[in-house]
Image: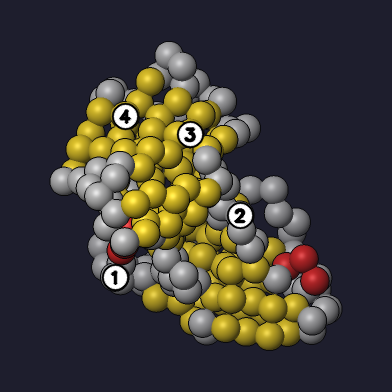
Amino acid sequence: ETGVTQSPTHLIKTRGQQVTLRCSSQSGHNTVSWYQQALGQGPQFIFQYYREEENGRGNFPPRFSGLQFPNYSSELNVNALELDDSALYLCASSKRQGTTNEKLFFGSGTQLSVL
Amino acid sequence: GENVEQHPSTLSVQEGDSAVIKCTYSDSASNYFPWYKQELGKGPQLIIDIRSNVGEKKDQRIAVTLNKTAKHFSLHITETQPEDSAVYFCAALLSNSGYALNFGKGTSLLVTP
């Protein structure tokens, strides 16, 4: 087990709704990244948070947003849900040292279904 | 951006045999290459990683090799066991960007007793 916890584990929403997913990072880690994993695919980078600021973003629209809190936990918010947003959402924590950020440890994810 | 290709997509071996999974990457500036194992219903688990200044790294039955010139890296599992059955992902990162791991599409490994 990595010590990265995500909630909820499963979620069902309807198209157009909004959702908030939560992540508690591993002790001693200061960086949180979010990934989207569609069925049968590798995880796709959404964004990363460091020092409570977005520190990099993948090819996802602005309706995907996030927060990082002083205790390094994080939230992923998705507005105006679309059917294609159905996926496993993974949170990964890591310890950034200087400009190096390696060894990402993933939680078990939140399975989001959009109907 | 970085593009990571992974082969094969599925691999079936008999218990005790070796398994090899290969990946290629496109960005020559990538300098960190982890491998993850994902079991059903779980998140990816880091099993081994290698930096670009090293050609090979071994941890018990698992080894990774890196060829920077050819831009490819491989995962080797020896003496496979049924509990090695899972989906394995390779990834590449430009670590001083502090940003994204770029993952391959995964290899579903089945180890049959």
The first of marks 2 and 1 along the sequence is 1
| In the image, residue A25 above or below residue B99 | below
Identify the residue under disc 3. Answer: B23
Label placed on residue A1: 1
B85 left or right, relative to B41: left
Q: x, y (%) of residue A5? A: 39, 76
The single residue placed furthest to the right in the displayed view is A16
Q: x, y (%) of residue B113? A: 31, 61
Residues under labels 1 and 4: Cα distance?
26 Å
- Secondary structure beneath dot 2 equals loop
**Front residue (pair B90, A6):** B90
| In the image, residue B27 above or below residue A82 | above
Q: Chain of mark 1?
A: A
Q: Are marks 1 and 3 on the same chain?
A: no
Label placed on residue B76: none
**Front residue (pair B93, A68):** B93
**Front residue (pair A52, A33):** A33
Residues under labels 2 and 1: Cα distance?
22 Å
Identify the residue under disc 2. Answer: A41
Q: Amino acid at mark 1?
A: Glu
Residues under labels 3 and 2: Cα distance?
15 Å
Identify the residue under disc 4. Answer: B65
